[in-house]
């Protein structure tokens, strides 16, 4: 399922965009956050900057092969992704930081206490954390991706007011 922005045009007047920069965080930055970043990129107006990083990133590693496979089935190519370590500068520059688990939010708050208020669970609106599928079977990835899709769709509706780009 592709998640799309509510706007008929990929360009939205700058004044109407609440979040100009969104950072998506997980642990290794090779499974959940790259999938979420790619789906959010599909949903976001073109001028919104999106990035992902990991609190314990496998720096410079590509996305997990299962993440690549599942996203390819959705028409999204993750082969160019390389994992990045989360830094306080990344958090500072982001208008919104979306994390997969409560412990990730706590990590970001410990790293940069002034970030409180802009760090939220991707699954906030569904009241779920998104479990890590790393080193698990395909079903764990499918389940994580379904929750990620739901989270991206819910945030897209709230941020951009609808469901289609």
Image (tube, rainbow, N blue to C red):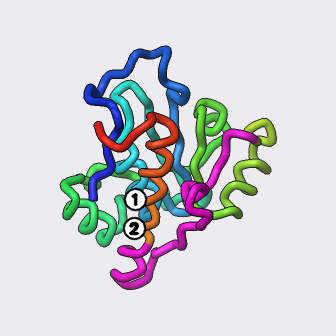
Whole-percent x, y for residue 5 in the image: 35, 38
In the image, taking residue 124 as reference, residue 7 lies left or right, namely left
Please identify the quarter of the rendering in which residue 18 is found: top right
Q: Which residue is mark 1?
A: 149
Whole-percent x, y for residue 84 in the image: 49, 49
Q: Any magenta on residue 135? A: yes
In the rendered view, would you say 92 is above or below 4? above
**In the drawing, what numbered circle is on residue 146?**
2
Q: Residue at x 30, y 69 (%)?
A: 65
Please identify the quarter of the rendering in which residue 114 is found: top right
Crowding near the residue tagged with mark 2, few <14, some 14–19, many ≥20 C-alpha atoms within 10 Å: some
Q: Residue at x 50, y 46 (%)?
A: 155
Q: Could you tell me which quadrant the N terminus lies in? A: bottom left
Crowding near the residue tagged with mark 1, few <14, some 14–19, many ≥20 C-alpha atoms within 10 Å: many
Magenta region: which residues? Answer: 117-143
In this orientation, which residue lies closer to the viewer: 140 or 31? 140
Q: Is residue 41 visible?
A: no
Q: Residue at x 44, y 31 (%)?
A: 49
Please identify the quarter of the rendering in which residue 128 is found: bottom right
Whole-percent x, y for residue 163 in the image: 35, 44
Q: Residue at x 46, y 66 (%)?
A: 147
Task: Provide the secondary structure element on which disc 2 rests.
Answer: helix
How many marks on residues? 2
Task: Provide the secondary structure element on which disc 1 rests.
Answer: helix
Q: Any magenta on residue 51? A: no
In the image, taking residue 62 as reference, residue 111 lies left or right, namely right
In the rendered view, would you say 142 is above or below 125? below
* Contact check, label 2 and label 1, Cβ < 8 Å: yes
Marks 2/1: CA–CA distance: 5 Å
């Amino acid at each position: 399922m592709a998640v799309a922005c509510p706007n008929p045009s990929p360009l939205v007047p700058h004044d109407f965009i609440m979040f100009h920069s969104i950072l998506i965080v997980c642990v290794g930055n090779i499974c959940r956050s790259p999938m979420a970043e790619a789906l959010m990129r599909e949903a976001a107006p073109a001028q919104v900057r999106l990035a992902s990083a990991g609190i314990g990133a496998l720096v410079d590693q590509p996305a997990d092969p299962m993440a690549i496979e599942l996203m390819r089935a959705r028409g999204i190519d993750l082969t160019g992704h390389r994992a990045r370590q989360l830094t306080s500068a990344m958090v500072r520059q982001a208008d919104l930081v979306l994390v997969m688990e409560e412990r990730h939010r706590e990590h970001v708050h410990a790293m940069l206490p002034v970030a409180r208020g802009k760090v939220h669970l991707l699954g906030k609106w569904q009241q779920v954390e998104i479990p890590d599928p790393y080193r698990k079977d395909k079903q764990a990835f499918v389940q994580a991706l379904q929750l990620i899709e739901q989270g991206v769709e819910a945030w897209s509706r709230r941020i951009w007011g609808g469901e289609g780009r």
